[in-house]
Amino acid sequence: MSKIVLDASVLLAIIYREPGWERMRPELLARAAVSSVNLAEVQGKLMTDGWSSDEAWEDATSAVAEICPFTPAQAKIAGSLITQTRTVGLSLGDRACLALAIELKAPAYTADRLWKTLSLGVRIHPIR
């Protein structure tokens, strides 16, 4: 069973039941990996919206099967992606997600349709 990689936007869509969240079926989430960078983004957003730290962490991590630390190799990939992704305005968190997907040779899932315009050698699946 191959892994998939989730962007912070997908986790937030699931938590807030935003459009596209229903596409993330249990069998997909059972294979889901997420970068620790993206979890920090989600936790920060939830806390800004009033969650406690523990509640935010529980909600951020409950939908994923694997949390992946942000490694030096991923940092190098994410930094290198800046030139290819600048026109679409990808953040460090977005590039961290893509770096993990590239490293795992796994498809990346996002709520950002603009990612589909990128050609990075990894499949992109917008949920909206």
Image (tube, grey):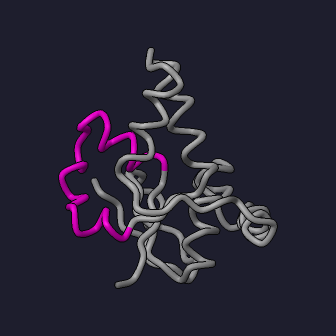
Image quadrant holding the N terminus, namely: bottom left
Residue 35: quadrant of the picture: bottom right
Q: Main secondary structure of the magenta part?
A: helix
Q: Is residue 83 visible?
A: no
Residue 96 coordinates in the image, percent (x, y): 64, 59
Count all numbered tags in the image, as a single digit.
0
Q: Image point 30% across, 44% down: which residue?
A: 14
Question: Foreground residue, 119 or 59?
Answer: 59
Q: Image point 55% across, 72% down: which residue?
A: 101
Could you tell whether 68 is left or right of 34 in the image?
right
Identify whether 46 is placed above or below 83: above
Could you tell whether 43 is left or right of 76 in the image?
left
Identify whether 30 is placed above or below 104: above
Could you tell whether 109 is left or right of 72 in the image?
left
Q: Furthest-top residue in view?
A: 50
Residue 30 drawn in magenta: yes
Residue 53 coordinates in the image, percent (x, y): 53, 25
Magenta extent: 8-31
